[in-house]
Amino acid sequence: MAEITAALVKELRDRTGAGMMDCKKALAENNGDVEASIDWLRTKGLAAAAKKAGRVAAEGLVGVATDGNRGAMVEVNSETDFVAKNEQFQGFVRDVTQVALAGNITDIDALGASAYPTGGTVAEALTQNVATIGENQSLRRSAIMSVNSGVVTAYVHNAAAPGMGKIGVLIALESTAGADVLEPLGKQLAMHVAAANPLALNGDDLDADLVARERAIAEEKAAQSGKPAEIVSKMVDGSIAKFRKENALLSQLFVMDGKTPVAEVVAAAGKDVGATITLKGFTRFQLGEGIEKEESDFAAEVAAVAGV
């Protein structure tokens, strides 16, 4: 039996994209013959199909679309930032965002199964993109916002094309005021959200686990002060109050002037036009957030699998 070296495994993997264990098995089954191993992998359905699967897709675009009192936002990932400049990819992001908006779709599986404008399904169009563009791509998430009366406005930061970029924000404003008032206000608020990255609308809406974690950190820091227990307790409460204020949208200082709480900005806008304006909510997508890009020593990995 021919020796299955790390170099052979690497060559077969580079040429087929199959997993290293599959490559090692293929070589073993074919006495180290790379060409025969390629054919073996193809007959098993392990070549080519695996070529792009498994690659980390953390780049891409966030797409936004609005229609009066409704808005949609979708994140579509790719492997490299270069693809975000591809017109075919941009067209797909634009179309799939409109599909989400038209169908009020937030479930990714449902979005993938939806009809695509040019025929077939969204998932089939995505598969075609992967084949023709040559990179792994994926639908990651979708959001819908709406109000009964008012507007949903959108903003994208680092725009690659109209309605798509690195950060997307939807702002929902409930009011009887006209769009000529609400749209500019919503745009400014969306820009604030993009920059300040609030974690919730109100301080009380902050994730309980996140607040508990911050409290534990504050308690440890306060305990190191050596002050009496009652003072330590007040220090902790003060730290948590500050955390809530700085991370809730309505209590954050408006980035446009750096001094007015967002809640007061909204109230003042309503007072100016004689109508109540309520900031009902926001959604913020930052491209690739939460996706881990694994770093690995490929040479060491190959050697370990090949047993050399």
Image: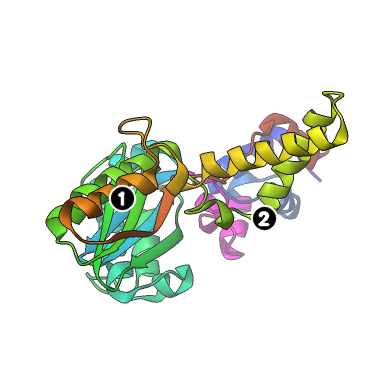
Q: Nearer the viewer, residue 250 or 90?
A: 250
Q: Nearer the viewer, residue 273 or 96?
A: 273
**x, y percent for residue 256:** 30, 33
Instruction: Answer yes or no: is residue 292 visible.
Output: no
Read off the magenta span.
37-58
**Residue drawn where x is 31% and y is 36% of the image:** 158
The image's mark for residue 171 is none
Q: How is the image coloured?
A: rainbow
Kindly check if marks 2 and 1 are in contact, taking CB atoms under 8 A apart as contact. no
Task: Point out the tag, 2 or 1, that comes first from the N-terminus.
Answer: 2
Q: Nearer the viewer, residue 174 or 43?
A: 174
Calculate the distance from the C-alpha at mark 2 to the C-alpha at mark 1: 27 Å
Q: How many marks do you count on the picture?
A: 2
Q: Is residue 65 above or below residue 149?
A: above
**x, y percent for residue 34:** 62, 45
**x, y percent for residue 228:** 87, 30
Q: Is residue 50 above or below residue 106?
A: above
Q: Nearer the viewer, residue 271 or 298?
A: 271
**Residue drawn where x is 55% and y is 48% of the image:** 16
**Residue drawn where x is 40% and y is 55% of the image:** 282
- The amino acid type of the residue labelled 1 equals Val
Residue that badge 2 annotates: 208
The image's mark for residue 266 is 1
**Residue drawn where x is 38% and y is 72% of the image:** 105
Quarter the C terminus occupies:
top right
Check disc 1: other Cα within 10 Å, few if <14, some if 14-19, many if 20+: many
- The amino acid type of the residue labelled 2 equals Ala
**x, y percent for residue 150:** 24, 65
Q: Secondary structure at mark 1?
A: helix
In the image: residue 284, left or right of residue 217: left
Q: Is residue 298 above or below residue 33?
A: above
